[in-house]
Image (cartoon, helix red, strand yellow):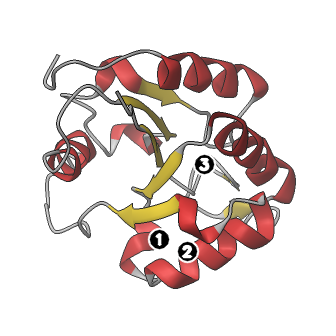
Amino acid sequence: MNVQRILFLDFDGVINRMDEDGYYIGPEIDRGLAERVGRMVNTLQVKVVVSSDWRNYHTLKQLQNKLWKYAGIVPQRVVGTTEPAYRKDGIRGQEIQDWLKGFVAPVRIAVLDDNHEGRFNMDGVRPWFVHTKHSEGVSDANIEQATALARRMVTRWGM
């Protein structure tokens, strides 16, 4: 059986750092943080789906190029984005579930997101949600947790 591994990736607060007011601390994309994610993706051969608000302002091709340049993730691994943030209630968990509707479980997933100020509800995907600190970005501990999740089988949604 060919089981897919999918990482739902936020950018702000994950591969960069943000202050409390939503301004970047340092570069728009922090190469060190991005490379941390890239090592996980490349080691586990994970497919990446961008769930970040960046999907509203960049094409898939532009996102692929940024992840290649900063994280070393080959463009073919970045397979899509969740639907643009058309929901006013900010239920990112539902957007992720909507994207997964095209897949038949089992799959293996992880969600890396800073869930900045509780703005995005992770209901439905909470067991696979790895919470980063927006002021620090993704940590080694976050990567370890996401790696463990990406190795664990998901058999149904809405848990």
Q: Earlier in the sequence, mark 2 or mark 3?
A: 3
Q: Secondary structure at mark 1?
A: helix
Q: The C terminus is located in which quarter? A: top left
Residue in the image at 60% along x and 48% along y: 13
Residue 28 shows in the view: no
Q: Which residue is mark 1?
A: 54
Q: The N terminus is located in which quarter? A: top left
Q: Quadrant of residue 55?
A: bottom left
Q: Secondary structure at mark 2?
A: helix
Q: What amino acid is found at the position of numbered circle 1 in the picture? A: Trp
The crowding category of the residue bearing disc 1, from other C-alpha atoms within 10 Å (few below 14, some 14 to 19, many at least 20), is: some
Q: What amino acid is found at the position of numbered circle 2 in the picture? A: Leu
Q: Is residue 24 left or right of residue 32?
A: left
The CA span between labels 1 and 2 is: 8 Å
Frontmost residue, 48 versus 1: 1
Q: Is residue 53 left or right of residue 112?
A: left
Tags 1 and 3 in contact by the CB under 8 Å rule? no
The crowding category of the residue bearing disc 3, from other C-alpha atoms within 10 Å (few below 14, some 14 to 19, many at least 20), is: many
- Res. 63 mark: 2
Q: Quadrant of residue 132?
A: top right
Q: Earlier in the sequence, mark 1 or mark 3?
A: 3
Q: Is residue 74 left or right of residue 36?
A: left
Q: Nearer the viewer, mark 1 or mark 2?
A: 2
Q: Earlier in the sequence, mark 1 or mark 2?
A: 1
Q: Which residue is mark 3?
A: 13
The CA span between labels 2 and 3 is: 16 Å
Residue in the image at 28% along x and 33% along y: 122
Locate residue 150, reporting x and y percent.
50, 26
Q: Secondary structure at mark 3?
A: loop
Q: What amino acid is found at the position of numbered circle 3 in the picture? A: Gly
Q: Is residue 58 above or below residue 144?
A: below
